[in-house]
Image (tube, rainbow, N blue to C red):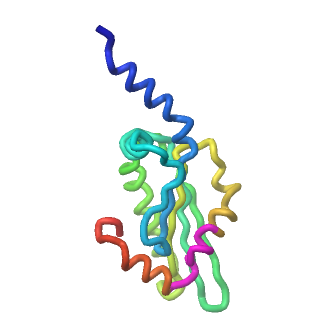
Amino acid sequence: MKSRKGKKRNALKALQPALDNVVLYSAHCFDQMQIIGVKNRAIHEAIFNQSHKFNIMLLTFCSDGASQWVDTFIPNISPCKSREAQDICDPISEKMIANHNPKHFICSAWYCTLTDKIDLKAMEQDIVELFRSAGAFDRQICNLAWNMRPENEK
């Protein structure tokens, strides 16, 4: 009788091209996390249950009324599961927020791919524009969206 372990490993390997096209992102200006590229349950489960070489950009959006600015940071994360990546990124994001005057801080955000084959730094302007167009520089939009989130997503 053949082992089923090999079949499961082959199924995960077969999903890899699809996983390389997955993008996850969220911010205070969205009322929920955005997921692009998830076409079936197997991909969804692989995203959250499998180790990946996460490629994450953390962002903070600020304004002093006269000007607006964005700080970005791309942490170097070893392959891990999504919960471990979150445990690494949350303190960094909190530190980025703490480095700003609370009167200037409007929104924090993150943008993630499941592969390091994508150059997030080269995409920075597009990523910033994605959040800007969603209202990342609008305190009212951010507060409304954040307040609409269930407590377990905050």
Answer with the quarter of the image where residue 89 lies.
bottom left
The image shows residue 52, relative to residue 9, as above or below, that is below
Q: Nearer the viewer, residue 53 or 33?
A: 33
In the orientation shown, which residue stands out farthest toward the front?
40
Which corner quadrant holds the N terminus? top left
In the orientation shown, which residue stands out farthest toward the bottom?
65
Q: Nearer the viewer, residue 145 or 122?
A: 145
- Give the mark count: 0
The image shows residue 4, relative to residue 50, as above or below, that is above
Q: Nearer the viewer, residue 53 or 8?
A: 8
Answer with the quarter of the image where residue 5 lies.
top left
| Magenta segment includes 17 | no
Residue at x 37% of width, y 79% of height: 147
Q: Is residue 96 visible?
A: no
Magenta-tinted stretch: 130-139
Residue at x 55% of width, y 43% of height: 115
The image shows residue 75, relative to residue 70, as above or below, that is above
| Magenta segment includes 132 | yes
Is the magenta region chiefly helix, strand or loop? helix
Answer with the quarter of the image where residue 117 lies.
top right
Q: Nearer the viewer, residue 97 or 68?
A: 68
* In the displayed structure image, the side of residue 152 where residue 23 appears, left or right: right
Which corner quadrant holds the C terminus? bottom left
Residue 145 spot, x, y in % from top left: 43, 77
Residue 138 spot, x, y in % from top left: 55, 83
Residue 75 spot, x, y in % from top left: 53, 54
The image shows residue 29, relative to residue 73, as above or below, that is below
Residue at x 58% of width, y 70% of height: 131
Residue at x 50% of width, y 47% of height: 54
